[in-house]
Amino acid sequence: MNKKVAFYTLGCKLNFSETSSIGRVFKDAGYETTAFNSPADVYVINTCSVTDNADKKCRKVVKEALKHSPNAYITIVGCYAQLKPKEIAEIPGVDMVLGAAEKFNIIEHINDLTKQEKTIIHNAPIDETNQFVAAYSIGDRTRTFLKVQDGCDYSCTFCTIPLARGASRSGKIAEIVQQAEEIAASGVKEIVLTGVNIGDFGIRDGQREDRFLDLVQALDEVEGIDRIRISSIEPNLLSNDIIEFVAKSKRFVPHFHMPLQAGNNKVLGLMRRRYKRELYTERVEFIKSLMPDCCIGVDVIVGFPGEEREDFLDTYNFLNEMDISYLHVFTYSERENTIAAQMDGAVPGSQRSDRSKMLHILSEKKRRAFYESQIGKLGDVLFEGDIKDGYMHGFSRNYVKVRSLYDPLLVNEIVPVKYLAVTDAGEVDVQEIAAPLIHS
C-alpha cells in the first residue's frame, strides 16, 4: 500500500506552483496525494514570510495535521523555513525544516520517515541558493501557475524576499515553452506567469541572457493555450514594448497587476522603490490608450515608517484619480533584518488600520466602477467548478468576475457572454451568447 502525503500552502501563487511540483516529486516516488484533512504519512507545509503571523499560522496548521495523524512526519518548507528555521524547529510535532535550496530534494531528505527526538534542519545560506528550479501547478485549478523566475536583486527596505529566496534567476525560454506545452496538453485553458520579480526574467548564473519580452513572444506561439496572464510586474520593468505586444497578442490577456506601494514620492524614496509616481502614471495612461477595457490592479502599503497623514492622503488622492480597477492593500508590519524595521517615524497601529480601511473602501469603489463600465459589452468567460447558492463563477479575459446559474457543461469552458448587471455581491451577471467573439 502506497504511503500518503498531504500538502498545505500559505502565501503567493509562486508557492502554489512549487507545492504542486513537489507533489509530483512525491508521486514519482510512489506516494499517493491525499487531502490535508485526511490521515497521511507525511504532511508538507509550504510557508510564507510576507503575510503577518507566520509563526502563528504555521503552528496552527501543524496542530491540525497532527489531529488527523498523530504519528505523521511533518516537514516545513518555504520562505519562512529559510528565514526562521530554528523558530520553526521549536514548534511541537515538526520533524524537518528545509530551506530554499533543499525543498525540491525533499524525497532525499525524508528518507524512511523515522521521527527523531530533535527536529532536523537542512538550511544552506541563501547566497548558496542560485539554481532555478522549474515549477507549475496543475490538476487543482482551472488555471495553472507557471513559475518563470525566482529571487530578487532589488533592495526595497521593507522586504525579506531576497533573504528568503536569493538572487534573481530564471529558466531557459525553451524549457518554459516546453512546460507550457505540457500544461496545454493537460487541457488547462489559462496559464498565469508567476515569480518573485518576473519583469527581471532572463538572468542565469548572474548574467542577463534574455528579456521578459522574449519570453512573452515565445509563449504567445504555444498552441492549445487560450489565455496567458501576467501575475505581477514592476512598473519600471513593464516596458512600452511589452504593453504594445500584449495589446495585439493572440493569448496574453488585457490585465496587468502593477505594484505601486505608495503614491507619494517621499515614501517611495524611503521604500527604495525604483521609480517615482510619475512613471506609474505614464504606464497606466499608455495601457489605457491601447486597451481601454484593460484591468489594472495595484499593490499598495499603508503605514510605512515616515508616512505622515499628508503623505497617505497624497497616495489616496493619486489612486482615486487614476483609471485603475482594484487594489491589494497591505498594512505595513515590521520584518526582522529589514532596513524599514529600524527607521524612525513608526505609524501607530490604529492609524495603519484606519488608512487600510480607507483604501479597501476605495478598492471596492474602483472595482465596481470598472465592472459598471463593462455592462452591455461582450466578453468571454472561463468558468470554474465552484458552486455557491446555485451559481458558478468565472473570469473574463480582463478579469471581470462573473456568475451564472450552475451548468456542469460550462466547467473549464470559455463561453461568449454579454455583461448584464453588477450584483450586490460585486460580481457581474451574464447572458450566454452563441456568436463567437472577435477580440479587438
Image: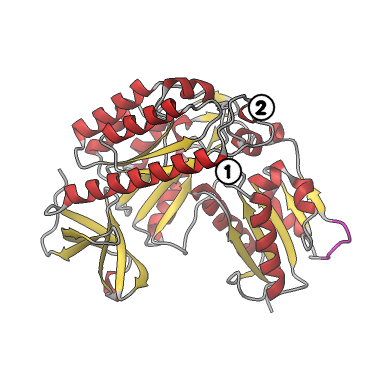
| Residue at point 42%, 26% (across, down) | 310
Residue at image mark 2: 342
Quarter occupied by the C terminus: top left
What is the three-letter code of the residue carrying label 2?
Gln
Residue at image mark 1: 50
Q: Position of residue 201 (x, y in %)?
A: 47, 32
Q: Is residue 285 above or below residue 111?
A: above
| Residue at point 79%, 65% (across, down) | 113
Please give left or right for residue 177 compared with residue 222 in the image.
right
What span is in magenta? Answer: 114-118
Q: Which image quadrant for residue 19?
A: bottom right
Q: Which image quadrant for residue 422?
A: bottom left
What is the three-letter code of the residue carrying label 1?
Val
Residue at the right extreme of this rendering: 117
Q: Residues within 10 Å of mark 2 (few under 14, many from 20)?
A: some
Q: Position of residue 257 (x, y in %)?
A: 37, 40
Q: Earlier in the sequence, mark 1 or mark 2?
A: 1
Q: Is residue 432 visible?
A: yes
| Residue at point 15%, 65% (across, down) | 431
